[in-house]
Image (cartoon, rainbow, N blue to C red):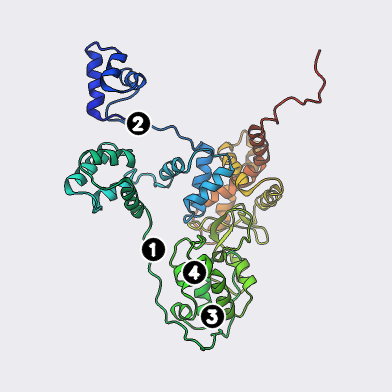
Amino acid sequence: MPNMLPRDRAELILALGKAGWSVNAIAGQLGYSPTTIRSYLTGRKTPGVRTARTRLLTDALADYSRQRLTEDPQLRPHALFNELKELGFQASKATFYREIQQLRQPSGQPTHPNQDLLDLVSRSRLLTDALADYGRLRLTEDPQLRPNALFNELKERGLSTGKATFYRELQQFRQPVEQPALPRPLRRPGEHTVVLPRPIAPITGETLSSYLPRLARANHLTLAEVLATLPSWFSTKINNPDELSQHHMLVPATTDALNALARLARTTPQHLAGALPAFGATHTRGPVRATTACRYCTARRGVSDPIPVHLPVHLKVCTHHGIWLSDTSQPNLDVTACPEIITAQHRANRLLRRYTPQQLVLAHEIAVTAIPPWPTSQAAIPRHWRHRLLTLQTINQHRGIGTDHDAYTRAAKYPDAIALVPGILNIRANEQDPMANSPDPRAPRQP
């Protein structure tokens, strides 16, 4: 049974209803269930308008997903789906993909809700001009039209291909176009292994696309010259926007690539694997977020340029130097004037002894929305996050950082949010554990 009847069939139901036909009579005549007939006659469904689906991604999980996509723009949907499953999301992967597509769509951008399907209709070689025009018309009339429904309509109009072929070509439009790997000459048998004269230590969590250029510049080489001495594994990796993804065709060559880079940089494979997430080593517990390394930590190693890194998702502050580690599109902030922010990071680290990073991030997002926008009294102003916000803006404005960044608000709210996190985690644990609210069987019964 399709989710929405064709417009002409739905209008016929309304016409028969106005003519005095009963629900059962219309159902017997047209072959639809009485429930479907009654939904159109009572106005719960409108001809040509698809009924809105019930959102299974709750507000808390939606906020968690938005924050994870903001912290790590290259986060794969299946990785986010696995994180949400650990947090209690019970819907299927197809339902998750449908709802997460709305979160990824920038606000105010007139993008078609099913742009992949629209591209397929417009450019596919499977469709004739007439079928392509019909497909574009149907997608314009019903932007939420599902691929299965469109395929059935196209089959009725003469589409000769199978459903598997239709979906396979649709998947090709959904996959990003991979950039070709840089060409390099192969090392000939018997040729000596190249060793660079100046080794460069990687920053913990540094991306491969940052470490290799630094290694090349330190030895007065170009990136292409360094890649020419390494396996093609590295060219493929740095041309992929998501270095953390472990493609099944690259996994067998990862060990050889790690050893080759260790020989070139005159270091140990264990050191590189622990510092560079691109090699797939689990050097952190749980998911990671994309940010920029603390400038003071990198300056101790003689590095003055910003270093993109992947750090644990719960790590917001460099507690050694009092630096707020913002998202990749935001500047890092000096929070030494607000020591309670550093204290809150220590408290969050202690919470990881009992809870997972995903649970901590979810509770933090719930707490952020629960923080009151204004203090309850004048005496509470010095302890309110808006007073902290003004302090951070004043301190960092002297460093040349503008005051119109979201990082200020998130940093200012961080201590108040972390203070609410333990209570939220306890409430959610009791909600998910049915035995937590049940009476103690050992307690004596009241007469």
- Calculate the distance from the C-alpha at mark 4 to the C-alpha at mark 3: 15 Å
- Calculate the distance from the C-alpha at mark 4 to the C-alpha at mark 1: 16 Å
- Calculate the distance from the C-alpha at mark 1 to the C-alpha at mark 2: 36 Å
* Numbered label attached to residue 3: 2
Quarter residue 138 falls in: top left
Say left or right for 267 vs 226. Answer: right
Q: Nearer the viewer, mark 2 or mark 4?
A: 2
- Calculate the distance from the C-alpha at mark 2 to the C-alpha at mark 4: 47 Å
Which quadrant, please, contains the N terminus? Answer: top left
* Numbered label attached to residue 218: 3
Question: Circle 3 sits in a helix, a strand or a loop, which is it?
Answer: helix
Tell me residue 418's x, y (percent): 65, 44
Near-viewer residue (71 or 75): 75
The residue sitting at 47% across, 60% down in the picture is 242
Say left or right for 164 vs 121. Answer: right
Tell me residue 400's x, y (percent): 51, 61
Identity of the amino acid at label 1? Glu
Q: Earlier along the polypeptide chain: callout 2 or callout 4?
A: 2
Q: Is residue 382 visible?
A: no
Structural crowding at the residue carrying mark 1, measured as other residues with C-alpha within 10 Å and reported as few (<14), some (14–19) or many (≥20)? few
Q: Earlier along the polypeptide chain: callout 2 or callout 3?
A: 2
Q: Earlier along the polypeptide chain: callout 3 or callout 1?
A: 1
Q: Earlier along the polypeptide chain: callout 4 or callout 3?
A: 4
Question: Circle 2 sits in a helix, a strand or a loop, which is it?
Answer: loop
The residue tagged 4 is 209
Q: Earlier along the polypeptide chain: callout 1 or callout 2?
A: 2
- For the residues labelled 4 and 1, say whether their Cβ atoms are less than 8 Å apart: no
The residue tagged 1 is 178
Identity of the amino acid at label 3? Ala
- Calculate the distance from the C-alpha at mark 3 to the C-alpha at mark 1: 29 Å
